[in-house]
Structures are given as C-alpha cells and as structure tokens.
Image (spheres, rainbow, N blue to C red):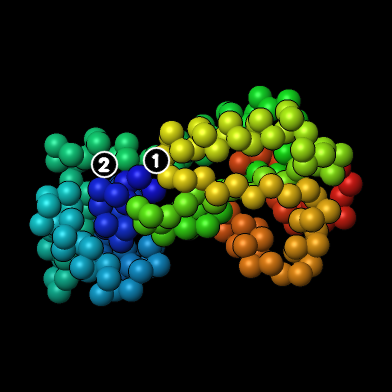
C-alpha cells in the first residue's frame, strides 16, 4: 500500500516475493509467485537490480535473483512492505473495542488487491447488525472515528459503506459487484465472512 508510493507497484510485488523466500529465484519463478507476466517481472527485476535492492547470480542459461539484505534501504523497505499487515492490525485493534460490534468489517478494493495508486480510496464495508438502527449515535460515532483514523494512518480518503445484514443479503442476491469483490478479495477484519451471514439473524 504505502510501499507502492516509494516503489512502483510491480517492483513492490517482486521485492515482497523475494523477501519471503530464503533462496534465489529465477525470473520465471518470481513471475509465477507474483502472478505477473514474465516481461513485467523482468522489467521490475531489472529496475530493482539497478537500484541495488536485488542481487543476481549466474545459473546458465539464466540468472537467479535474491533480495540484497545489506542494502542501506532494505530495513526501511521491509518496514514499508509490511505496512498492509500493520494497517490490518490497527483496524482490528480499533474495532475490537467498539461498544456495538459489526456483523462483519472488510477492507476491500484496490488496497486489498494490492493494486492501489496514490489516488486510490481506502474502501471499507461495515455490516451493521439488523438490531442496530442506522442513526444510532454510538454506531455512527464508531464508524466516523474509524474513517478519521484511516485517513491519519494512511493519508488516503476512507470510503466506508455502512449497511445492515438484511441489505447485505439483498445485495449479494442482486450480485452487487462491490459486494462480490469484498467477499472474494477483501480482508476480513472483524465479524464473520459475508457468505456466512446469509440466512443468519443478528
């Protein structure tokens, strides 16, 4: 997320992949792990190598790549690449003390897919138990506070969608694209997965 403002998105994905393993990888293996095309992977590896963040070793007829742990910037890069985990932990910690817990809370969209740009919003779906009224002051205060926190933590505008469980069930039945995306790609922070809420009373 934030690392993508320092490294290009594909470079960040490639460096993450190399940092997760303890052995050098071929360009083909990096492409397979990241889901990028081989040409895109090779361009990212070349830029990372030129910057000294990635080292190579010969393995004729190709090269093997590994992250350079001795680069001065590597500790900072490791921290930046771990910011998504930090964001998830902070949101979970904040929501854990809500007086009115959500039926489900999911971060979805480009941030969850690791495709965010500097202009991307931070999309959050908050499913309210049916017993909680939409204008409940406690509930509205919790949601507003989370939006403010997300803005301070990430610098992104938080786009929070607040719906009750009945509306969620109807939206899933209508195959609302954003709900399908949240169910498929989203980070479940609190409560239950969306599909588990189908047919449940809250």
Residue visible at 84% across and 44% down in the picture: 130
Callout 1 environment at 10 Å: few (<14), some (14 to 19), or many (20+)? few
Contact between labelled residues 2 and 1, with CB atoms less than 8 Å apart: no
Residue 96: x, y in percent? Answer: 65, 28
Residue depicted at 78% across the width and 33% down the height: 136
Of discs 1 and 2, which sits in the foreground?
1
Q: Is label 2 in a helix, a strand or a loop?
A: helix
Is 95 left or right of 110, judged from the image as shown? right
Per the image, the residue denoted by label 1 is 155
Q: Secondary structure at mark 1?
A: loop
On the rendered structure, is 198 left or right of 178? right
Q: Residue 30: which quarter of the image?
A: bottom left
Disc 1 and disc 2: Cα gap in Å?
19 Å
The image's mark for residue 77 is 2
Whole-percent x, y for residue 202 in the image: 86, 42
Q: Earlier in the sequence, mark 1 or mark 2?
A: 2
The residue drawn where x is 66% and y is 30% is 141
Q: Residues within 10 Å of mark 2 (few under 14, many from 20)?
A: some
Is 63 left, or right, of 34 in this rendering? left
- One can see residue 116 in this view: yes
Give the percent coordinates (x, y) of residue 6: 25, 48
Whether residue 18 is visible, yes or no, is no
Rendered position, 31 above or below 54: below
């Amino acid at each position: 997320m934030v690392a993508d403002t320092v490294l290009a998105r594909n470079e960040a994905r490639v460096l993450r992949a190399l940092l997760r393993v303890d052995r050098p990888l071929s360009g083909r293996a990096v492409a397979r792990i990241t889901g990028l095309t081989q040409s895109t992977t090779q361009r990212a590896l070349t830029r990372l190598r030129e910057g000294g963040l990635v080292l190579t070793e010969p393995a004729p007829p190709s090269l093997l790549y590994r992250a350079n742990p001795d680069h001065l910037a590597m500790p900072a890069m490791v921290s930046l690449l771990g910011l998504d985990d930090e964001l998830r932990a902070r949101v979970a910690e904040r929501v854990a003390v809500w007086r009115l817990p959500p039926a489900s809370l999911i971060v979805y969209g480009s941030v969850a897919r690791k495709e965010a740009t500097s202009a991307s919003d931070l999309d959050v779906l908050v499913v309210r138990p049916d017993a909680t009224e939409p204008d409940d002051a406690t509930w509205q205060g919790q949601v507003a506070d989370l939006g403010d926190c997300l803005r301070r933590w990430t610098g992104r505008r938080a786009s929070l969608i607040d719906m009750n469980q009945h509306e969620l069930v109807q939206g899933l039945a209508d195959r609302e694209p954003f709900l399908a995306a949240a169910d498929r790609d989203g980070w479940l922070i609190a409560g239950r997965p969306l599909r588990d809420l189908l047919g449940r009373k809250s």
